[in-house]
Amino acid sequence: MSYPSDYVEFHQYCRQIGRYPLLIHDQEYELAKRYQGGDMAAGQQIIHANLRFVVKVSRKYFYTGHNCLEIIQEGNLGLIRALHRFDPDRGVPFIFYAVWWIKATIKVFLQKSGKVHTGSLEHAKGLLPLDKTIGDDEACRWVDFLTDGVHPEKSYSDRERSQNISALFQHCFSFLSPREVLVIKQRFFTDPPVTLKEIGMQLGVSRERVRQLQVRSMEKMKGILNDQGRLLVEPEPHDAPVLKEVRC
């Protein structure tokens, strides 16, 4: 039985990267510190150990009409960008930090390429056509009503950007302690905001201590947002990866 070439290449690639050993946290920390000191081989070892995770993250984007190895390659570039910015002294496992970069790099690639999925629409039979008129009004169609006068592409782009920003904030929370997350959410994600005094009563600390937690948490998030938020717009062209790409 013969298989499509891209199917064969994908499985060959998976077998190839499966030979690289995984790392425990202590090994990863040591290699990351060596990489910070200029040891490119140490960085390459971290990249190789996480290539299987890139494949796992990339699978959800295989439906977009691109060759799956193209998607994986973009994810690998995100992995390399993440390593270039990774600070092992924060105590966060590398892949927890890298997953946002992997997803964001793939999404930027898909948005730029503009390819659309061309699969079967058999599952969509019986759905209401969007060009059907509403009632007796020949001038008003469902698509006009649903988009509220906004171009569908702009609407999708805005929604995608909003989702990316939301995901970035959730990613920031992974770098905060549970108390810091509680303070930020109650101060900025509730309406009306919970007062410092009320949060202090919940945590059993003073109002001033809550204010200090808020300031410290915002400083942490500011650093992460400055570092990673730029990719929401576009990867910097001069920011070339310092490691060799892993070719599929």
Image (cartoon, rainbow, N blue to C red):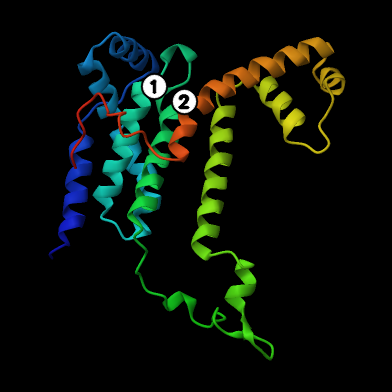
Residue 205 visible in the shown view: no
Extreme-bottom residue of the structure? 136
Q: Secondary structure at mark 1?
A: helix
Front of the two marks 1 and 2 = 2
Q: Residue 85, labelled with which disc?
A: 1
**Residue 137 lies in quadrant:** bottom right
Comparing 136 with 45, the one in front is 136
Q: Badges 1 and 2: C-beta atoms under 8 Å apart?
A: yes
Place of residue 72 in the rendered image (x, y in percent of width and height, measured from the top left): 29, 44
Comparing 31 with 226, the one in front is 226
Up the image or down, 151 lies above or below 19; here it is: below
Q: Residue 227, labelled with which disc?
A: 2
Q: Residue at x 17, y 46 (%)?
A: 12
Place of residue 10 in the rendered image (x, y in percent of width and height, measured from the top left): 21, 49
Marks 1 and 2 sit apart, C-alpha to C-alpha, by: 8 Å
Amino acid carrying mark 1 in the image: Arg
**Residue 121 lies in quadrant:** bottom left
Q: Residue at x 81, y 38 (%)?
A: 191
